[in-house]
Image: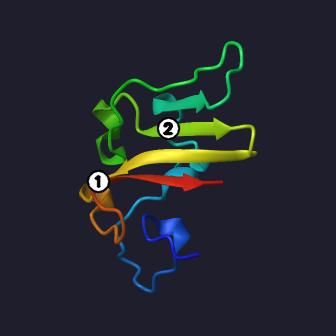
Protein backbone atom coordinates (compact mmCIF):
# COMPACT_ATOMS: atom_id res chain seq x y z
CA UNK A 1 0.00 0.00 0.00
CA UNK A 2 1.06 3.58 -0.44
CA UNK A 3 0.80 5.03 3.07
CA UNK A 4 3.66 7.53 3.35
CA UNK A 5 2.71 8.81 6.81
CA UNK A 6 5.30 6.51 8.37
CA UNK A 7 8.11 4.07 7.72
CA UNK A 8 6.15 0.82 7.58
CA UNK A 9 3.61 1.76 4.94
CA UNK A 10 5.91 2.38 2.01
CA UNK A 11 9.35 1.32 0.84
CA UNK A 12 12.14 3.91 0.69
CA UNK A 13 15.53 3.51 -0.95
CA UNK A 14 17.29 6.04 1.28
CA UNK A 15 18.86 4.75 4.48
CA UNK A 16 18.67 8.20 6.08
CA UNK A 17 14.89 8.66 5.89
CA UNK A 18 13.81 10.33 9.14
CA UNK A 19 10.29 9.29 10.08
CA UNK A 20 8.40 7.33 12.69
CA UNK A 21 6.02 4.42 12.19
CA UNK A 22 2.35 5.12 11.51
CA UNK A 23 -0.15 4.83 14.38
CA UNK A 24 -0.90 1.11 13.89
CA UNK A 25 2.76 0.10 13.76
CA UNK A 26 3.67 2.40 16.64
CA UNK A 27 0.98 0.73 18.75
CA UNK A 28 2.15 -2.72 17.71
CA UNK A 29 5.74 -1.88 18.72
CA UNK A 30 4.71 -1.43 22.35
CA UNK A 31 7.16 1.45 22.79
CA UNK A 32 4.54 3.94 23.98
CA UNK A 33 2.34 1.69 26.13
CA UNK A 34 2.41 4.11 29.07
CA UNK A 35 1.03 6.92 26.88
CA UNK A 36 -1.64 5.04 24.92
CA UNK A 37 -5.42 5.24 25.35
CA UNK A 38 -7.97 2.71 24.09
CA UNK A 39 -11.62 3.59 23.53
CA UNK A 40 -14.40 1.32 22.34
CA UNK A 41 -17.00 2.53 19.88
CA UNK A 42 -19.63 0.14 21.28
CA UNK A 43 -21.59 0.74 24.45
CA UNK A 44 -19.90 -2.05 26.40
CA UNK A 45 -20.29 -1.91 30.15
CA UNK A 46 -17.09 -0.66 31.74
CA UNK A 47 -15.44 0.28 28.44
CA UNK A 48 -14.12 3.77 27.77
CA UNK A 49 -16.31 5.14 24.98
CA UNK A 50 -14.70 8.51 24.30
CA UNK A 51 -11.42 10.38 24.60
CA UNK A 52 -11.34 13.86 26.05
CA UNK A 53 -7.77 15.06 26.22
CA UNK A 54 -4.73 16.22 24.32
CA UNK A 55 -3.11 14.01 21.71
CA UNK A 56 0.60 14.81 21.69
CA UNK A 57 3.17 14.05 19.05
CA UNK A 58 5.43 11.02 19.47
CA UNK A 59 8.43 13.34 19.17
CA UNK A 60 7.33 14.92 22.47
CA UNK A 61 6.93 11.53 24.16
CA UNK A 62 9.01 12.33 27.27
CA UNK A 63 6.68 15.17 28.32
CA UNK A 64 3.44 14.02 26.65
CA UNK A 65 0.42 12.49 28.34
CA UNK A 66 -1.10 10.64 25.35
CA UNK A 67 0.64 9.95 22.03
CA UNK A 68 -1.51 7.16 20.57
CA UNK A 69 -5.23 6.54 20.55
CA UNK A 70 -6.79 3.21 19.60
CA UNK A 71 -10.48 3.12 18.72
CA UNK A 72 -11.88 -0.39 18.81
CA UNK A 73 -14.77 -1.02 16.44
CA UNK A 74 -15.91 -4.44 17.60
CA UNK A 75 -19.00 -4.36 15.38
CA UNK A 76 -16.80 -4.35 12.28
CA UNK A 77 -13.75 -6.15 13.74
CA UNK A 78 -11.51 -3.19 12.93
CA UNK A 79 -9.24 -1.09 15.12
CA UNK A 80 -8.35 2.49 14.24
CA UNK A 81 -5.11 4.09 15.40
CA UNK A 82 -4.94 7.86 15.75
CA UNK A 83 -1.79 9.92 16.18
CA UNK A 84 -0.54 13.43 15.50
CA UNK A 85 2.01 13.15 12.70
CA UNK A 86 4.19 16.18 13.50
CA UNK A 87 6.87 16.89 10.93
CA UNK A 88 9.75 17.58 13.31
CA UNK A 89 12.65 15.90 15.07
CA UNK A 90 12.77 12.13 14.55
CA UNK A 91 9.75 12.46 12.23
CA UNK A 92 10.95 15.44 10.16
CA UNK A 93 11.10 13.38 6.96
CA UNK A 94 7.46 12.29 6.90
CA UNK A 95 6.13 12.64 3.37
CA UNK A 96 2.39 12.48 3.89
CA UNK A 97 0.09 13.97 6.50
CA UNK A 98 2.80 16.10 8.11
CA UNK A 99 1.51 18.21 11.01
CA UNK A 100 -1.88 16.50 10.81
CA UNK A 101 -3.85 14.01 12.84
CA UNK A 102 -3.70 10.71 10.95
CA UNK A 103 -5.76 7.55 11.25
CA UNK A 104 -4.72 4.06 10.20
CA UNK A 105 -6.71 0.86 10.55
CA UNK A 106 -5.82 -2.73 11.15
Q: Residue at x 47, y 45 (%)?
A: 82
Please identify the residue farthest to the top as the structure is shown: 46
Helix, strand or loop at label 2? It is: strand
Q: Is residue 40 left or right of residue 64?
A: right
Q: Which quadrant is the N terminus positioned in?
A: bottom right
User: x%, y% of residue 48?
Assistant: 58, 20
In terms of depth relative to the viewer, which is nearer, 43 or 39?
A: 43
Mark 1, other Cα within 10 Å: few <14 / some 14–19 / many ≥20: many
Quadrant where the C terminus lies?
A: bottom right
> At x 48% / y 52%, what residue is drawn?
103
Q: How is the image coloured?
A: rainbow
- Residue drawn where x is 54% and y is 69% of the image: 9
Residue, x 34% and y 72% (percent of image)?
95
Distance (Cα) linking label 2 and label 1? 15 Å
Q: Residue furthest bottom?
A: 13
Asked if 16 appears above or below 87 in the picture, the reply is: below
* Horizontal arrangement in the rendering, residue 75 relative to residue 54 (left or right): right
Q: Which residue is mark 1?
A: 86
Report which residue position mark 2 lands on. Answer: 69
- Disc nearer the start of the sequence (2/1): 2
Amino acid sequence: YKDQTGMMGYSYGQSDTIMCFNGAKSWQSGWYVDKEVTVNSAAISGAVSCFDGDLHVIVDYPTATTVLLKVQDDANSVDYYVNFNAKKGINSGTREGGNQVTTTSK
